[in-house]
Every structure is written in C-alpha cells, then in structure tokens.
Amino acid sequence: MNIKLLVTTLAIALASHSFAATATQPKAETPEQRDARMSWWREARFGMFVHWGLYSIPAGEWDGKGTKGHGKEWIQKQAGIPADVYEKRLYPQFNPKEGFAEEWAKAANMAGCKYIVFTTKHHEGFAMHDSAVTTFDAKDACGRDLLKEVVDATKAEGLKFGAYYSVIDWHHPHAYAGFGLPTVKGVTNQGRDNSIYVDYLHKQVEEIVTGYGDIDILWWDFSKPDCQGESWRAKELVSMVRKHQPNMVMNNRLYASKNSFVGADSNLLKEWDSEIGDFTTPEQSIPDTGVEGVDWETCMTMNKTWGYSKFDNNWKSSEELIRNLIDVVSKGGNYLLNIGPKADGSIPEQSVQRMQAIGKWMDVNSDAIYGTSASPFGKPQWGRYTSKADRLYAHVFDWPVSGKLTIPNADRKVSKVYLLADSAQNALPIESVGGGWIISLPSQGLDAVATVVVVQYE
Ligand code: GLC
C-alpha cells in the first residue's frame, strides 16, 4: 500500500470511528451525571455474586463421574451433554426450597455486602425469571418466578440488585456456536440463524429490565474477539436497557478484550464508557495497582468453582478473603465475592462461615471500607491504606514488633490517631519525623486479620 493510500485509509477509519463514538453515546450524560449515577456503586465496595442454575443439581458429577475443569456451571460443556439430554434430566428435578432467597439476602447483608449480582441466565440457557419466550425457565419448571423471589428478598434487606445475564446460550437452537465461543461438543452452526437467537436474547433482557422494578446492575457475560458487540446487536440492546433503567450500572462484557478475559479493554472503556459499559471486570484476580482512570470490580470465588461443586474443597481462608477485600478497596475497586448455592438454594456451610467471619470484621471496620477511595500512598509492607476526605485508614495485617508504625505526611495536620475497633477512641501517641508520622501502637493488634488505625486530619 502506498503512503497516500495508507493515510486516506487511516483518515477514513478515524472519521468513522469518531462518528460511531458520538452517534452512539447516550445523549448528553455529563461527567457529573455519570458520577451521580455511579455514586452508590463506588461507595458500596463489596457485593455478593450468586451462581445458581440447573448445573447446581449435578454439582460437578455426570453419569457417576466427576468432570474436568474448575467451574461446575460449565458441566454441560465439560461432559459434552447435548441440550435435550441436559434439559430432560435436570429440568424436572429443579425444585428449590421455600425462603432460599431470604437466606441469601440475609447472608449478604450480614457479611456487609451492599449488593447482590444473581445469574438470571447462565450459559446453560435456563432463565430464572418468568419468560414468555421460552418454557426453559423457572416458572415452567417449578411454577415459581425465582428472579422475583431473589429481587424481592434482596430489596427487603435494603441491598441493590444486579442481574447477571449470559449472552452465550447452549440451549437455544439458533444461538451461535463457534467464533471463539465455548460450545458444547458436536454443536455446529449448521442450520442456525443467530439473528433469531439475538431477538430472543433482547426479549428476555427486556422482560428482566421491565418486570422487576429497579435493576441496579446489568452484569453481562461474555464475549470473545470474534463474537462481541454487534454479534449481540449491543448498541440496540444497551439503549433499550438504558431507556428502561436510566440509573443502571453496567459491566463491559458485551465486548471482548484482546488480552485477558476481563471484558472490553479498559482503554476502550475510557473512551466510550456508557456504550461499552461502566466498569471493567478482572476475574479471579486483583490488579496490582488498580485500573487507572476506570471503575473496576474484581469478581472471585471462595473455592475454585462458581456453581456448586461437591468436590471442590479449595476454600480460601476468611483471612485471605477479608484481606482481599481490603486490597481491592485500597486500589479503588469493588470486590464481588461468589457463593454457589446447592440445588435446593441452601448456601454451603463453608461459605456461610466465611460470610460470617467477614461480617464480624465489617461490623467493627466497615467505616474503613464503604465510601473510601484508593490509597494515596501505594502498598505499605505491613498492610494497606484506604482513605476518605478527612482521614486515612491504615489496615495493619502484620503488627510491627517495634510497636511503631510510620506513615507518610500528607502535608496535613493530624488531629487524632486511634484504633477503629476502640469504641472509646483513645488517642495513640504520635510524633512527627522527617517526611511523616510515627504512631506508637499498643503491644498487640485488636484483630489478627487486620487492625485498622484511623488517622484523623484536621
Ligand atoms: C466466566 C465464566 C462463568 C462465570 C463468570 C464469572 O464468564 O464463563 O462461568 O460465570 O466468568 O465472572
């Protein structure tokens, strides 16, 4: 290609790119309006993810054999089960106990979560709401609208509600197989018309965003470079959703990332935010230094599976989970921690224990989590910082043997330093040195996982 042609091609590409960006941006959401829309989500910092579907019944075992792969919500693909066989075996067995949704919402609230994100339809295609466009839904399977039960219970606990929706579908006869998407063995595109499936997907999402009051989050899952955006008619989909739920917050997985499996590249998100999504979604990992200039949420399992598995005993300790929460928040992100209830809806005992332990820590220390921003001083060796306008929180993981904690000077006067767990707020002695302050600590911390020292500025 000669230079002139290259320049012209580039110019056309750039022009059409910026045209696309302006033409599709929702009308005039100012940065202030966006901040207002995002504010509850940014303050919340901690949410509970729930993976629950027909796959919770086999719980990792098919025909007497455990399947390979960590996420047991993928059992249909792991065991190569044709959709009709999967449906025939599992659908009639699905009959959750009464009141399961209240248990979830109470567990979330107890742990200090401010929102719940629930799999309204995972890759298996089974819809938890009462869907008029399929009988492969909860209403037809067990006579109950399970989405309504979950939404109502969540709101009754004063929490925000997020709907996870998988654009991948292993059940619908026209959903595309291939194009880099994971498909069940033997399924091809022959005779499939993706547009029929995409119509269906739009209708289901419309049912969800119009039939259940406020849906605070739409958590899409997922795309690959060859199958993303307009493969789902994303622009139309997003504008429909935003029309019905103008305050909603949305993740970025209608688009793919080139590098890792975290939804659209964060750079794309910066440029096209409202269209591509509002936040990015590192999965099972905590970015080293946060994600510059972009809202983000780390989603993570307590063991290694999202959907319930009777085999997975790789439980993270409560200490690790609490420190993960602090680590994420210290870098400006949210932490979405998963539970995978059993088929009847009950939460595995190991998860309940962990939620309780987190809740116990949060009862004392949540001031150092909610509404805080990223550390102004990076990652100290002994723990993490979070901050608010008038205070700094030092989360001490490793209590210093010297009894002294040195913190940098923020060029501000310190009025008082105390332990958050000390209800009397007894002042700790401080001394100013070169670039900072030395705090004299009691001989022991008040919490072996993380004791929070509050540095109150004048
Ligand atoms: C991936 C997996 C899925 C899980 C999700 C959570 O998309 O396919 O099973 O629901 O990640 O982030």
Image (cartoon, rainbow, N blue to C red):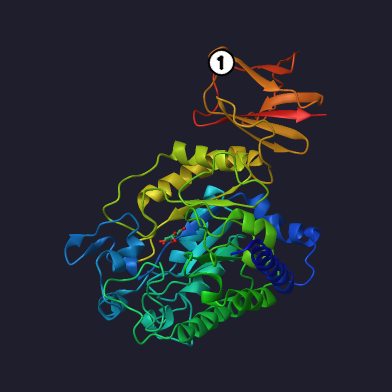
- In the displayed structure, 292 sits above or below 403; it is below
Q: In which quarter of the image is residue 190?
A: bottom left
- In the displayed structure, 25 sits above or below 69; it is below
For label 1, being within 8 Å of ligand 1 is answered no
Residue 290 placement (x, y as % from top left): 60, 43
Q: In this view, does 39 lie to the left or right of 225?
A: right
In terms of secondary structure, where does tag 1 sit? loop
Residue 246 placement (x, y as % from top left): 70, 71
Q: Residue furthest front?
A: 2
- In the displayed structure, 421 sits above or below 258; it is above
Q: In which quarter of the image is the C terminus?
A: top right
Q: Quadrant of the N terminus?
A: bottom right
| Residue 370 in view of the camera | yes
Q: Residue at x 25, y 76 (%)?
A: 89
Q: Which residue lies furthest to the left in this view?
A: 64
Q: Is residue 86 left or right of residue 264?
A: left
**Which amino acid, mark 1?**
Ser
Residue 119 placement (x, y as % from top left): 47, 66
From the image, tell me which residue sits under label 1.
443
Q: Which of 252 and 451 is in front in this view?
A: 252
- In the displayed structure, 398 sits above or below 258; it is above
Q: In this view, does 429 lie to the left or right of 254?
A: right
Q: Which residue is drawn at 52% across and 44% down?
A: 359
| Residue 343 in view of the camera | no
Q: Which of 315 and 85 is in front in this view?
A: 85
Q: In which quarter of the image is residue 244?
A: bottom right
Q: Which residue is drawn at 43% across and 86% down?
A: 193
Q: How crowded is mark 1: few (under 14 residues within 10 Å), some or many (20 or more)?
A: few
Q: Which residue is drawn at 51% across and 85% down?
A: 199
Query: Where does ligand 1 appear, by image quarter?
Result: bottom left
Residue 227 placement (x, y as % from top left): 47, 70
